[in-house]
Amino acid sequence: MALVRNETAVLKNFINGKWVDSSGAETLEVPNPATGEVLARVPISTKEDVERAVQAAKKAFASWKNTPVPKRARIMFKFHHLLTEHHEELARLIVQENGKAYKEAYGEVQRGIECVEFAAGAPTLMMGETLAEIAEDIDSEMLRYPLGVVGGITPFNFPMMVPLWMFPLAIACGNTFVLKPSERTPILANKLAELFTQAGAPEGVLNIVHGAHDVVNALIAHEDIRAISFVGSQPVAKYVYEQSAARGKRVQALSGAKNHHIVMPDANVELAAQHIVNSAFGSAGQRCMACSAVVVVGENERFVQTLKKQADELVIGNGMDEDVLLTPVIRQSHREKVLGYIEKGVEEGAVLIRDGRKEMAELSEGNFLGPTIFDHVTPTMTIAKEEIFAPVLSLLRAADLDEALEYIRQSRYGNGATIYTKDAKAVRQFREEADAGMLGINVGVPATMAFFPFSGWKDSFYGDLHVNGKDGVNFYTRKKMITSRFDF
Ligand code: NAD
């Protein structure tokens, strides 16, 4: 979308507890992906805006780090309460700016609330360790401390959940935070800041700077930012990881995905198809845990036909309408890119058994694309290797589980994988050999909950400590060791 200059309805940045104008002159439209209606304009903020936000966060850190941990946790309890009270409103906002179905958005709000729930456990989570008598009359203890100012950079596909993976836990651990939300779904972040302030967060503890790559580069380059949490596409994740690490920052960068679902010959065909249709086409395939490749083991035409039939029957439309499963992709430019992948699939010899381009013509208003299924895809084809991030599903054929697992090993990505089977031995082999960080056994979207790490492998993650769970606590704290002698 072209950069536009406009004086009205421009979102504000949130710096030092105040809503302020960006110093950037340019703005981008934020359209509803289902209707094209412009909801707001997002400012393309500058290095100077980042500087102001970091200075505010740095100042706030001086007192926030000494705020008693239970007091910090109480703000999280209040925040949790407010998010729960606004559950439906938040879900509606997500549908408007992201386009996903209301039910999906409602679930996303719930996942976000669970992150706040987890962060409210800070007094327990931040506890250190002590061992008396590590030597005669000598004790050792470990205490946890926050890092300082943390920067967070988030993608368009989970405007609520992903920011909440980051700032509640970072802040509960005593850090202060500068968030750069996706410029494609920036509206919800402002609502989160509003509710967090109502919950009692002091000024400067959470700051929001809207914008694009300039803001990201300024955050990475800023010497007062101690750590970066990033979630987004693979090339950007790698760039952010490398640039941040080169400057000595702690960094966790969650990246793209290609998630394989293996359908074994003994699988419950109806259920497997249902889970795969939901996983591949729900949220228009724009989930990092979406199924994008199915490996059909053995001859299983019944499964392929059932899948196709269920895809034919799913409801496409505006996420606010009831029963809708397949919603629009985020932007027309993204749809254009996806159409290129469909052409490439045909060109490289995959068999297009369901062409979603026909629904495009029927639903001309938003960025819709119908469910698209390719059969007889091979692992070397472009559509098998690259993340398409759309309702485009590839079916690969394998003779046995060993071959199916080999396809997963060959993928550069390793976010998630699922197997559909009743065979305990197959389950165990899959658990041990699937080369991905989050596995599902008869589960369509095996995304982890807030108390476990979100655990992508290979090019789906750059860094050491993942978001959420104990990894999240370790990421947002540093440890101090004290050794004491008492034989004086
Ligand atoms: P994106 O990479 O386009 O944008 C992510 C963030 O990076 C945004 O805030 C954006 O402003 C910024 N950005 C984009 N290009 C940049 C550049 N050249 N330099 C600096 N910053 C830049 O990602 P997206 O399209 O918003 O989100 C979808 C992607 O995120 C998919 O690849 C998806 O798999 C991934 N994702 C991964 C996870 C996970 O847990 N692994 C979760 C959600 C989304």
Image (cartoon, grey):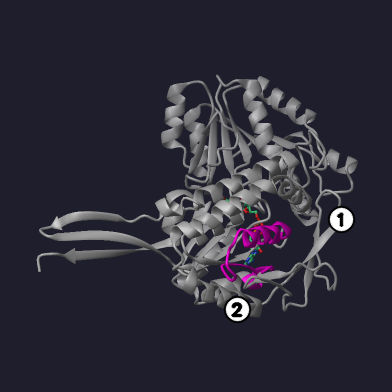
Q: Nearer the viewer, residue 283 or 391?
A: 283
Residue 128 versus residue 205 in the image, above or below: above
Amino acid carrying label 1: it is Glu
Residue 444 versus residue 258 in the image, above or below: above
Question: Mark 1 packing: few (<14 Cα in 10 Å), some, or many (20+)?
Answer: some
Task: Write the residue at 86% across / 50% down.
Answer: 35
Q: Position of residue 356 (x, y in %)?
A: 79, 39
Q: Do the residues labelled 1 and 2 touch (CB within 8 Å)?
A: no
For label 1, the SS is loop
Quadrant in the picture for the N terminus: bottom right
Q: Look at mark 1 in the image and give the residue it sits on.
A: 37
Q: What stretch is highlighted in magenta?
A: 186-215
Task: Write the residue at 65% across / 50% down.
Answer: 83
Q: Look at mark 2 in the image and give the residue it sits on.
A: 51
Residue 50 versus residue 228 in the image, above or below: below
Magenta segment: does it hold 188?
Answer: yes
Residue 386 versus residue 228 in the image, above or below: above
- State left or right for residue 440 relative to residue 389: left
- State left or right for residue 11 relative to residue 466: right
Magenta segment: does it hold 187?
Answer: yes
For label 2, the SS is helix
Question: Mark 2 packing: few (<14 Cα in 10 Å), some, or many (20+)?
Answer: some
